[in-house]
Image: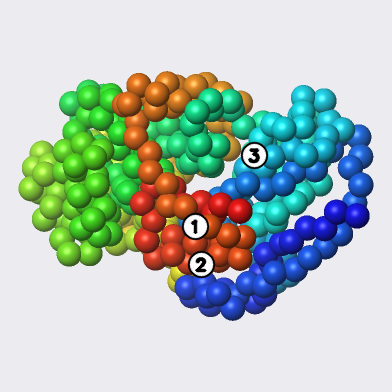
């Protein structure tokens, strides 16, 4: 009988997650039935939504997460042994799962799917620029915000998995791009390697002052990954009929109390701004379209990526805690 290890929630999070909030358990897996596969995880994903989705945190449950895994046994058409598959099976090293039309998956997430053939690119990119973070940046920016050449685009969390992609796509579209990140090293990366026009450390620079310097005529498009006071200040510096996409609120995820709505400045009304929440699952039926374009830009050198890789199954909580502290550049993953 095949055994699996899994990392479960040992107690409810109280503020910032800690190592003792998790524990490792083992379980026996059932035999593979028709329509199912047995997959062995290769990489775990580490994402802000794991902390923000409070409804998914129940003591004793496997920590919710995406993973890219190798199929080692299959009784499902279209899922051959040896291929890689992306599934929201959490932090577990082996999984027997339904795939195809009858597969169940968490709400607001995508069903298990074969990872794209990446050729010589790392398979971990299926959890990053060529996976959920890539889609989370690509479609909300291009379909919802629709930036035009010459417009000013501001990205918060700009050195993260989604923000770093969004800023580069805005550059491809001919926009002036301003990024906010949480360290001088990240600011240097954004400016020197990713070619952002302006980048600022929000911990040491006043956001409003920085925007008046970099965008004296105002901001047209705001891609919001963080929420909180920073977003209020950016919204206060937007132009008439500006557009905002809300993708995340990492600045508030570790708060013990239910998140409160950040007060919108009067300028939101006066400038007739538009704010829309965007979840990547909205574009599940266009996944291949988005990944195909992102992969083309990667291969052309127009879209650069960076991964922060943590080695070892038992180190997944450490990687998760570090990501919430802003220690990662680009996508954070755990290599099993």
Task: From the image, tell me which residue sits under label 2.
Answer: 318
Task: From the image, tell me which residue sits under label 3.
Answer: 86
Residue 232 occupies which quadrant of the picture? bottom left
Q: For the residue labelled by badge 3, is the local secondary structure a helix, a strand or a loop?
A: strand
The quadrant the N terminus occupies is: bottom right
Report if the CB atoms under discs 1 and 2 are less than 8 Å apart.
Answer: yes
Q: Residues within 10 Å of mark 2 (few under 14, many from 20)?
A: some
Which residue sits at x=75%, y=43%? 39
Looking at marks 1 and 3 on the same chain, the residue that comes earlier in the sequence is marked by 3
Foreground tag (1 vs 3) = 1
Q: Is the residue 38 above or below the residue 326 in the image?
A: above
Work out whether residue 286 or residue 325 is closer to the camera in this orientation and state it.
325
Which residue sits at x=74%, y=38%? 71
Task: From the image, tell me which residue sits under label 1.
Answer: 310
Can residue 113 be seen here? The reply is no
Distance from disc 1 to disc 2, alpha carbons, whole Å, reads 8 Å
Q: Is the residue 56 above or below the residue 41 in the image?
A: below
Foreground tag (1 vs 2) = 1
* Left/right of residue 99 with respect to residue 267 in the rendered view: right
* Left/right of residue 197 with respect to residue 31 in the rendered view: left
Looking at marks 3 and 2 on the same chain, the residue that comes earlier in the sequence is marked by 3
């Amino acid at each position: 009988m095949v055994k699996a290890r899994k990392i479960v929630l040992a107690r409810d999070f109280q503020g910032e997650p800690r190592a003792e909030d998790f524990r490792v358990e083992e379980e026996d897996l059932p035999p593979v039935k028709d329509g199912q596969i047995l997959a062995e995880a290769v990489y775990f994903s580490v994402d802000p939504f794991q902390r923000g989705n409070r409804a998914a945190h129940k003591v004793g449950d496997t920590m919710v997460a995406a993973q890219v895994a190798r199929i080692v046994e299959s009784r499902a058409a279209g899922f051959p042994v040896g291929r890689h598959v992306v599934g929201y099976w959490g932090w577990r090293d082996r999984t027997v799962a339904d795939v195809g039309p009858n597969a169940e998956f968490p709400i607001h997430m995508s069903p298990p799917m074969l990872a794209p053939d990446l050729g010589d690119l790392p398979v971990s990119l299926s959890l990053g620029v060529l996976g959920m973070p890539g889609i989370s940046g690509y479609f909300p920016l291009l379909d919802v915000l629709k930036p035009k050449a010459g417009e000013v685009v501001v990205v918060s969390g700009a050195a993260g998995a989604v923000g770093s992609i969004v800023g580069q796509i805005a550059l491809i579209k001919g926009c002036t791009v301003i990024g906010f990140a949480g360290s001088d090293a990240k600011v240097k990366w954004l400016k020197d390697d990713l070619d952002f026009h302006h980048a600022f450390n929000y911990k040491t620079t006043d956001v409003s002052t920085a925007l008046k310097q970099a965008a004296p005529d105002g901001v047209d498009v705001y891609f919001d990954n963080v929420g909180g006071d920073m977003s209020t200040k950016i919204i206060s510096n937007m132009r008439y009929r500006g557009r905002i996409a809300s993708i995340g609120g990492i600045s508030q995820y570790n708060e013990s109390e239910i998140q409160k709505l950040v007060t919108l400045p009067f300028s939101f009304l006066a400038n007739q701004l538009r704010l829309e929440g965007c979840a990547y699952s909205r574009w599940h039926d266009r996944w291949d379209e988005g990944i195909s374009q992102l992969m083309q830009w990667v291969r052309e050198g127009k879209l650069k990526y960076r991964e922060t890789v943590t080695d070892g199954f038992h180190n997944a909580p450490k990687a998760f805690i570090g990501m919430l502290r802003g220690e990662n550049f680009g996508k954070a993953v755990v290599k099993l």
